[in-house]
Image (spheres, rainbow, N blue to C red):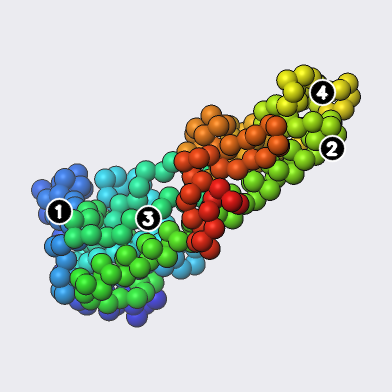
Amino acid sequence: MKTVLTLVLVCCTVLPLSAEMTLPDVLAGKAAPLTITVKELDGTWRVFKAGEQGGGISTLLAMSFAEAVSVGACTYYTHGQVLTAGTQTYLVAYCRPLPPVDLQAMQHGPPQPTPLTRDTVLALSLLDLRTLGSLVDIHPVEMPKLLGDSVKTTTAVNEAKLKADEARLRANLRQLRNAIEQFHVDTGVFPETLFGLIAQSGTRPKGADGKPVAEKAYIGPYLDPMDSINKTGIKLNPFVDPGDTDVTHHWRYDPAKGTITVPVSLANRKTLDGDAYGAL
């Protein structure tokens, strides 16, 4: 830890705050630009990642000194300059801004990353050297490698997410088919709609013939609200907007046969294994 910080400080250019240079001045971009683009990077810049040590949290100062987040997952770009503000010293670096957090969407998996391009914007980050922890994987910027590695990483992450979504699709189809079959075993008919699978206990949902099932035949609901459309119990199709509450946009159900598959819009799409979604 001590050796790492010494190496950083030796190569740094200190940018002291004068009496006229206040923290608002720094945040206004008077000490360093608030943003740069990837195309402004060259071989004089260094790339690194900051890791937490001993549970410490780095202070990330971009637009507000009150905003503190972990820096473990971020790649930083720096000229090695440091800036002093009173008794605090910050490493001046740039990082790709985090996208807005959509908590509802993240319940169904992380957002898909996008690769770096020469026009990607990097935002100013002031890293508190006292709590920064270790700096790892330090190396010069090599533009072709930087952009190429970003594309490879993005492709790998997207493929992993696609694989996970396809596994969810198969699992949710299996749960829906099991529920339809159990409805049929209990009542002797298939449900008129998928909502018949989640009817309250003691009720008489309609069968495929449009008539309520026999008295006391239905012993559902057969599905739990986990990973379902609007928490109804009817499972989500992971390739449809999770906020879309129209069940027909998620699934194609045939009450006459009790079969269920993906909607026509997804039927010809191929899985990573080469199977048509409509044949799953």
Which mark is nearer the camera, 3 or 2?
2
Q: Secondary structure at mark 1?
A: loop
Which mark is nearer the camera, 4 or 3?
4
Which mark is nearer the camera, 1 or 2?
2
Which mark is nearer the camera, 1 or 3?
3
Q: How far is disc 4 from disc 3 in space, using C-alphas?
A: 48 Å
Label 4, on which residue? 213
Q: Residue at x 27, y 77 (%)?
A: 139
Q: Amino acid at mark 3?
A: Pro
Question: Are the residues flagged by discs 1 and 2 in contact, CB closer than 8 Å?
Answer: no
Q: How far is disc 3 from disc 2 in space, using C-alphas?
A: 45 Å
Q: How far is disc 2 from disc 4 in space, using C-alphas?
A: 12 Å
Q: Residue at x 15, y 74 (%)?
A: 44
* Mark 4 crowd level (few <14, some 14–19, many ≥20, 10 Å Cα): many
Q: How far is disc 4 from disc 1 in space, using C-alphas?
A: 70 Å
Label 3, on which residue? 113
* Mark 3 crowd level (few <14, some 14–19, many ≥20, 10 Å Cα): some
Which residue is situated farthest in the top direction here?
A: 211
Residue 214 visible in rendering:
yes
Label 1, on which residue? 33
Residue 39 in the image: state x and y as whole percent: 15, 62
Q: How far is disc 1 from disc 2 in space, using C-alphas?
A: 68 Å
Label 2, on which residue? 185
Residue 225 visible in rendering:
no
Which mark is nearer the camera, 4 or 1?
4
